[in-house]
Structures are given as C-alpha cells and as structure tokens.
Image (cartoon, helix red, strand yellow):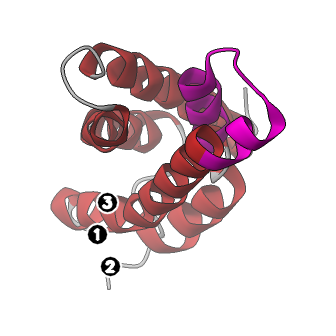
Amino acid sequence: MNNRFARFFLVGAAAAAVNILGRVLISCFVRFEYAVALAFPVALTFAFVMSRVFVFEASERPVWKQYLRFWLVNLVALIQVWLISIGLTYWLFPAVGWTFYPELCAHIIAVCSPVLTSYYAHKVFTFSGKSG
C-alpha cells in the first residue's frame, strides 16, 4: 500500500482497536470517564511506533522530540475523544433513547473523530523532515 494516508488510516484503526480494547479492560476496574483517559497512553505509544515505522519518512528530529510532538497532537485528540465520549454517553444518547452499548458506541465514534486533523498535524508537525 503506497498511499500514506491509507497507511495512516490502517495504523489509526489498529491504534483505535488497542484504545477501545484497553478502555473496555480498564473499565472493569475504574469508571468509564477514567478508563477513556487511562487507555490513551497505551494506544498513543502503539500509534507512535507504528506511524514511525509504516507511515512517515525518517526525520532529522530526535525520536524523543517526535514522541513529544506526537503526544501534543494526540493530547488535543484526547480532549476531543473524551468530550465526545462523555457527551454522547451522558447527554445525547439518553436524550434520543439510545440504549445499545452506549459507552462502547460513544467511545468508538469518538476515537474515529480526529482522523483527518491528526493526520495533517502529524504530517506537518510531528514527522516533518525539519529538525526544528
């Protein structure tokens, strides 16, 4: 697969699966709101390694700086995912009478929401060839 966005999408889908599975497992021990946030660093690290290996070209920037930039971009995504997850679960779904696995459905929708903005941010900020 030569298309970078397609590779990014597949890595993102795998990271989303890691995120959702991690959240489901963590939810066995803590409340949903906390589980959403706690699953984030596991999926983030998985996504970083996979993106670095399979999606973006080598950069002059040190790996730790790339990871820091990756983390910053994904921090914005985490806020988006958390707000959408909570908003759907506690406000929108109850308002429309949605009862079919509301936490799981809300989290899946939310995890998918930042795909385009994250791709662009990682392309020009995280993994750009510039060393700055």
Q: Which amino acid, by three-letter code, is at mark 3?
A: Trp
Viewport quadrant of the N terminus? top right
Is 104 one of the magenta-colored residues? yes
In what element is the residue under mark 1?
loop
For badge 2, the amino acid type reads Ser
Magenta-drawn stretch, dominant element (helix, strand or loop): helix
Closer to the chain start, of discs 1 and 2, is: 1
Q: Position of residue 43 (x, y in %)?
A: 35, 34
Q: Is residue 52 above or below residue 12?
A: below
Question: Please, which residue is most extreme toward the right here?
Answer: 96
Q: Is label 2 or label 3 in front?
A: 3
Q: Nearer the viewer, residue 45 or 86?
A: 86
> What separation in Å lies between label 2 and label 3 (alpha carbons)?
17 Å
Which quarter shows the C terminus? bottom left
Give the spatial CA distance, label 3 vs label 1: 15 Å
Question: In the image, which residues are magenta?
Answer: 91-111
The answer to whether 113 appears left or right of 72 in the picture is right
Which residue carries the number 1 mark? 61
Mark 2 and mark 3 lie on one chain; the one further toward the N terminus is 3
The kind of residue on which mark 1 rests is Arg
Residue at 36% across / 43% down in the picture? 48
Residue 120 locus on image (x, y percent): 64, 65
Q: Which mark is residue 131?
A: 2
Question: Residue 50: percent from the left, percent from the top?
Answer: 41, 33
Please provide percent x and percent y for residue 113: 67, 48
Residue 8 appears in the figure: no
Sequence-wise first label, 3 or 1: 1
Structural crowding at the residue carrying mark 2, measured as other residues with C-alpha within 10 Å and reported as few (<14), some (14–19) or many (≥20): few
Is residue 51 toward the left or the right of residue 94 in the image? left
Residue at image coords 31%, 44% = 37
Say if 46 sits above or below 83 in the image. Answer: above
